[in-house]
Amino acid sequence: MANLGQLAKTPQASSALEVLIEAANSSEGAIRAQVAIVLRHFDDPEAQAALMKLRQDSDYRVVGATLEGLV
């Protein structure tokens, strides 16, 4: 999952973003937390919307992951 961030500025960015958006809806909090970290690499409205949704997650690890980049 973490490697998908390396595709953010490549022609494969849209495919990587699709995978991340799907994973953002995972039932596993650890996966959603990882997605939140990787989504920060994408300068895309869809990625930003997913991050905003993850900031409201019920799992504190996910919320923490969305806030890591803001410190």
Image: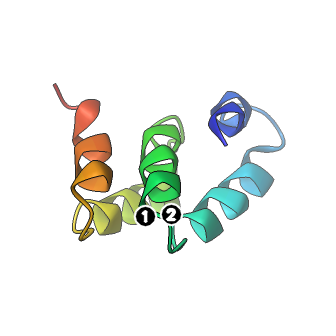
Amino acid type of the residue tagged 1 in the rendering: Ala
In this rendering, the label closer to the viewer, 2 or 1: 1
Residue 53 x/y as whole percent = 32, 69
The answer to whether residue 63 is left or right of residue 36 is: left
Q: CA distance from mark 2 to mark 1?
A: 6 Å
Q: Quadrant of residue 69?
A: top left
What amino acid type is highlighted by mark number 2? Answer: Glu
Q: Residue under circle 2?
A: 46
Residue displayed at 50% across by 42% down: 43
x, y percentage for residue 22?
63, 70
Q: Element under label 2?
A: helix
Secondary structure under tag 1 reads helix
Tell me: residue 46, above or below residue 42: below
Residue 28's disc number = none
Q: Are marks 2 and 1 in contact (CB under 8 Å)?
A: yes
Is residue 34 left or right of 57 when viewed as pictured? right
The residue drawn where x is 74% and y is 50% is 16
Q: Quadrant of the C terminus?
A: top left
**Which residue matches tag 1?**
50
Tell which of 62 and 66 is nearer to you: 62
